[in-house]
Image (cartoon, grey):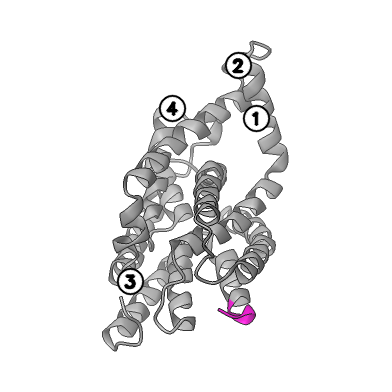
């Protein structure tokens, strides 16, 4: 991969990570078009996600500092266990368990068979319908102050659907929240916080794996770093825009986009432009 291709993939990652359209699917599709049918790989995808997740940390920095600080103080008795910020710390931990367990159990499949583009096309289209139906009938009443331990775990299970390219981490988590009656913006905020341990864990694990084997990622370290930085810059802008947008709009444009993308991907696969 050259530097221009790295810029393009960084832009794609930054634009698609937080929208309910599946960043892993976009990086895989665009990457294969640029690579002449060769997938950039799960390792490259996980590493550049460190850029967009760093954007989450910067954007929610004050909230994160409060959550960690209050959670730590609650452990030593300086704050009550039911302190709202301390409680959110536990809820993020509990919600992170499903994707960690499933990610480790199915690591080989996630990096291999689950990246098949036919499956990606099915997930893009199928989950578009799910997202549209859930959003249409959502109650949009609950706030994060009403988040329970059970709901935190269910949020985590919804997030783990993103292990399959085409689902979308934010889309799966937000759809799960809508099913449980949470407001769009509340579900989105929790999905961003919930993604921090999962994405950093996956990204640093892949980074360690690459460094410990002495190998270089499929696209080279220079382009990978550039793509990560670009994803970070664009990611901050997308977070700001999305939280404002979903407070007054539904997900219909994203549903339509996913269906069109799924149809386009099927056409590319059927005509042999892309290999599955």
Give the x, y percent position of residue 130: 33, 57
User: Nearer the N terminus, badge 1 or badge 4?
Assistant: 1
Please say whether residue 253 is one of the residues in the magenta stretch: no
Frontmost residue, 34 versus 236: 34
Give the x, y percent position of residue 9: 56, 72
Q: Which residue is mark 1?
A: 68
Q: Residue at x 45, y 82 (%)?
A: 33
Q: CA distance from mark 3 to mark 4?
A: 35 Å
> Residue 3 has which mark?
none
Q: CA distance from mark 4 to mark 2?
A: 18 Å
CB-based contact (under 8 Å), mark 1 and mark 4: no
Q: Which residue is mark 3?
A: 117
User: Nearer the N terminus, badge 3 or badge 4?
Assistant: 3
Please say whether residue 2 is one of the residues in the magenta stretch: yes
Q: CA distance from mark 3 to mark 1?
A: 39 Å
* Magenta highlight: main SS: helix
Q: Residue at x 39, y 29 (%)?
A: 150
Q: Is residue 160 left or right of residue 3?
A: left
Query: Would you call the spot at circle 2 few (<14 residues within 10 Å), some (14-19), or many (20 or more)?
Result: few
Q: Which residues are magenta?
A: 1-5
Give the x, y percent position of residue 265: 35, 78
């Amino acid at each position: 991969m050259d530097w221009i291709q790295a810029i393009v993939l960084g832009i794609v990652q930054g634009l698609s990570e937080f929208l309910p359209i599946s960043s892993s699917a976009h990086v895989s599709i665009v990457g294969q078009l640029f690579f002449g049918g060769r997938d950039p790989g799960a390792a490259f995808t996980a590493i550049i996600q460190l850029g967009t997740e760093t954007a989450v940390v910067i954007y929610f920095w004050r909230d994160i500092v409060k959550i960690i600080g209050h959670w730590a103080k609650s452990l030593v008795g300086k704050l009550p266990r039911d302190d709202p910020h301390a409680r959110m710390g536990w809820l993020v931990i509990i919600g992170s368990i499903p994707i960690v367990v499933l990610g480790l159990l199915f690591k080989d499949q996630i990096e291999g068979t689950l990246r098949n583009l036919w499956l990606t096309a099915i997930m893009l289209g199928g989950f578009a319908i799910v997202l549209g139906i859930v959003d249409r009938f959502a109650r949009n009443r609950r706030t994060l102050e009403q988040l329970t331990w059970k709901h935190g775990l269910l949020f985590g299970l919804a997030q783990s659907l993103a292990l399959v390219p085409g689902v979308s981490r934010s889309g799966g988590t937000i759809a799960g929240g809508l099913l449980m009656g949470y407001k769009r913006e509340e579900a989105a905020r929790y999905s961003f916080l919930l993604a921090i341990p999962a994405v950093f864990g996956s990204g640093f694990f892949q980074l360690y794996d690459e460094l410990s084997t002495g190998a270089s990622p499929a696209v080279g370290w220079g382009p990978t770093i550039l793509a990560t930085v670009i994803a970070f810059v664009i990611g901050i802008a997308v977070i700001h825009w999305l939280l404002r947008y979903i407070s007054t709009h539904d997900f219909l444009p994203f549903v339509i986009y996913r269906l069109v993308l799924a149809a386009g991907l099927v056409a590319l696969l059927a005509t042999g432009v892309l290999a599955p």
